[in-house]
Amino acid sequence: MRRVGLLSLPLLALLMVPGSAAAYPTRVQAVADEFRLTLSRTSVPHKRVKIELVNFGEDPHDLKLRRIGGTRTYVIPETLPGAHTTRTFRLRPGRYRVWCSVADHETQGMRATLRVRRD
Ligand SMILES: [Cu+2]
């Protein structure tokens, strides 16, 4: 019994840190190649979302997000083949259109949808 009590103390301390869960953004990896855009998850809780664009292709790619019905465009700048770029955005709940805006990549298939949940 005593051993169980000792083990649970650090866990209890961790759980009691106020706002500890909110301190970390949700991570999403967006893998780009010709001509696909694959998100590691398609639904995230709202607030801070950390998106990493990883370019596995042979062309440069960028990433843009816009909430359907919204006017603001969130941008991860053009990223070279083999490179990755990370940005953290504060996103409102809704459905976001995600696409690569380089040349005609979007119409070739580099698009996805990200749902930002209210929870
Ligand atoms: Cu592209």
Image: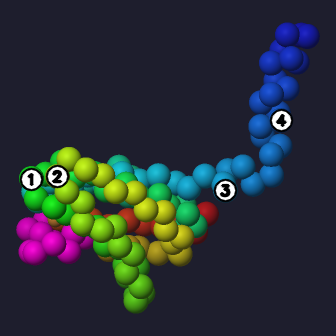
Q: Is the distance from the Cβ of mark 4 to the nearest ligand 1 atom less than 8 Å?
A: no
Q: Nearer the viewer, residue 116 or 52?
A: 52
Quarter of the picture for ligand 1?
bottom left
**Residue 41 on the magenta segment:** no
Marks 3 and 4: CB-CB under 8 Å?
no
Which of the 4 quarters of the picture holds residue 45? bottom right
**Could you say whether the residue bearing mark 2 is in a helix, strand or loop?**
loop
Residue 58: numbered disc: 1
Residue at (80% x, 28% y) in the render? 10
Q: Is the distance from the Cβ of mark 2 to the nearest ligand 1 atom less than 8 Å?
A: no
Q: CA distance from mark 3 to mark 1?
A: 37 Å
| Residue to which mark 3 is pinned | 22
| Residue to which mark 2 is pinned | 81
Q: Position of residue 71 (x, y in %)?
A: 40, 89
Tell which circle, 2 or 4, labels the residue nearer the N-terminal end.
Answer: 4
Which of the 4 quarters of the picture holds residue 52? bottom left
Residue at far right of view: 2
Residue 13: numbered disc: 4
Q: Is the distance from the Cβ of mark 3 to the nearest ligand 1 atom less than 8 Å?
A: no
Q: Nearer the viewer, mark 3 or mark 2?
A: 2
Q: Which three-letter amino acid code belongs to the residue tagged 3?
A: Ala
Tell which circle, 3 or 4, labels the residue nearer the N-terminal end.
Answer: 4
Marks 2 and 1: CB-CB under 8 Å?
yes
Neighbor class of circle 2 (other Cα within 10 Å; few <14, some 14-19, many 20+) is some
**Residue 100 on the magenta segment:** yes
Q: CA distance from mark 2 to mark 4?
A: 44 Å
Q: CA distance from mark 2 to mark 1?
A: 5 Å
Residue at (10% x, 59% y) in the render? 59
Query: Left or right: where does residue 115 sit relative to residue 83?
Result: right
Tell which circle, 3 or 1, labels the residue nearer the N-terminal end.
Answer: 3
Q: Which residues are magenta?
A: 99-109
